[in-house]
Amino acid sequence: MTQSDHKYLVIPGPVEVRREILEAQSQWMIGHRSSEFAALYGRLHSKLQQAFFTESRVFMVGCSGTGFWEGASRNCIRDDQKVLHLRGGAFSDRWASISEANGKQVDTLDVEWGEAHTPEMLKEALQNGPYDAVCMVHNETSTGVTNPVKDLAAVVHAEAPDTLVLVDSVSGFLGTELCTDEWGLDLVLTSSQKAFALPPGIAFAAVSDRVLARAEQIEYRGYYFDFLEIDKSAQKNNTPSTPPVSLMFAADQQMDDILAEGIENRWARHIAMKEMTHEWATSRGFGLYADEPYRSNTVTTVDNREKGIDVNEMSKFMAGRGFAMDKGYGKIKGPTFRIAHMGDMQIATLEEVFDGLDAFIGK
Ligand SMILES: *Cc1c(COP(=O)(O)O)cnc(C)c1O
């Protein structure tokens, strides 16, 4: 392995962060009411708009992605209206629980783990509305399924034009195609530590005018994630409370590097890594857990049921080679394990991961 001072993270979050990005955090601190901060906010914001493919605002808050789940549920769903959550894995389940924990009226559209939501089933489920919002997960990290968000959003707009489309792209953003405005997504939330390849602790959300108009109709939006307050500060390139300045330095540097690579090139690199991973897994007698047309570009959930390797032993063996491996998530831990191929990982590194896994299997 190329490094010996740490384990390279092959887990689906947090992912490996390059040393240049870690070092970008060590710049001298600045006050967040200073003009230097406003300049940092402004230039990072315009790069984030490019990354989200949006002309709307992008919020940045010191929290993990979960914070914006709660913010989205609170600001977008009125108490006397319903929300439809599309569930098919651990993360989409959790977002629905968060809406419930905030007292919202939750309907769910469930698919088996490993399956995707289709426009047809969504069209039917919308008959049970009206819904203030439909919440969906772009890339379900537990199962390795990418939902057809573009087509799902189109169905919502055609069938229920007043319904907001809220999307979790925590593990898709900057690893797989996502076009906020063109696809008509009202809110897209993400966190830093997945395909964005930043340290954990800052989350981002592209937010449409329709979302803010809805928030105005809601009296109790909470405090920390009150979108109207966040927007008021954002208009002055500022934040209501103290932001994670060091992480914003890192994000600013990382966005420069991502734009230099090219966002479409970054998506293409992820597709290449996905294809390599499928080829490795299937040629070694493993299955692929996710349904065929919906397999994720950023994480592969390897079906270990037939082959039955001991994932704990595998993980120990790989740690000896300098790699931190996943052992599966939640109820499918063991029968499956995940190989994350996201962020700044390069093809050569992924090949070293496969060499290690081959050495373990052949052992
Ligand atoms: C990791 C993950 C989350 C949770 O994000 P945090 O930043 O840990 O709060 C939510 N959704 C998906 C799809 C994820 O992969």
Image (cartoon, rainbow, N blue to C red):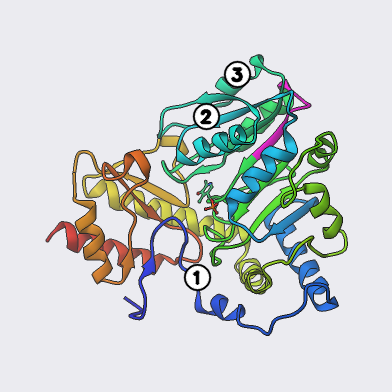
Bin the neighbour count of mark 2 within 10 Å (Cα to Cα): few under 14, some 14-19, many 20 and up: many
Please identify the quarter of the rendering in which residue 244 is found: bottom right
Q: Are marks 1 and 3 in contact (CB under 8 Å)?
A: no
Q: Position of residue 233 (x, y in %)?
A: 84, 59
The spot of residue 300 in percent (x, y) is: 39, 48
Q: Nearer the viewer, residue 72 or 339?
A: 72
Q: Amino acid at mark 3?
A: Ala
Q: Secondary structure at mark 2?
A: loop
- As shown in the figure, which amino acid type bears the numbered disc 2? His
> Any mark on residue 117, and which?
2
Please provide percent x and percent y for residue 46.
77, 63
- C-alpha distance separating marks 1 and 3: 41 Å
Whether tag 1 and tag 2 are in contact, CB under 8 A, the answer is no
Tell me the kind of residue under disc 1.
Answer: Val
Magenta stretch in the rendered image: 159-166
Q: The residue tagged with tag 1: helix, strand or loop?
A: loop
Q: Is residue 50 visible?
A: no
> Foreground residue, 360 or 234?
234
Q: How far apart are the two marked residues, 3 and 2, measured between alpha carbons?
A: 11 Å
Q: CA distance from mark 1 to mark 2?
A: 32 Å
**Mark 3 crowdedness (10 Å alpha carbons): few <14, some 14-19, many ≥20:** some
Q: Earlier in the sequence, mark 3 or mark 2?
A: 2
Image quarter in which the C terminus is found = bottom left
Q: Nearer the viewer, residue 197 or 90?
A: 90
> Percent x, y for residue 294?
47, 37
Residue at left offset 66%, top offset 32%: 153
Question: Pointer 3 and pointer 2: residues touching (CB < 8 Å)?
Answer: no
- Left or right position of 305 against 205: left
Residue pointed to by mark 3: 125
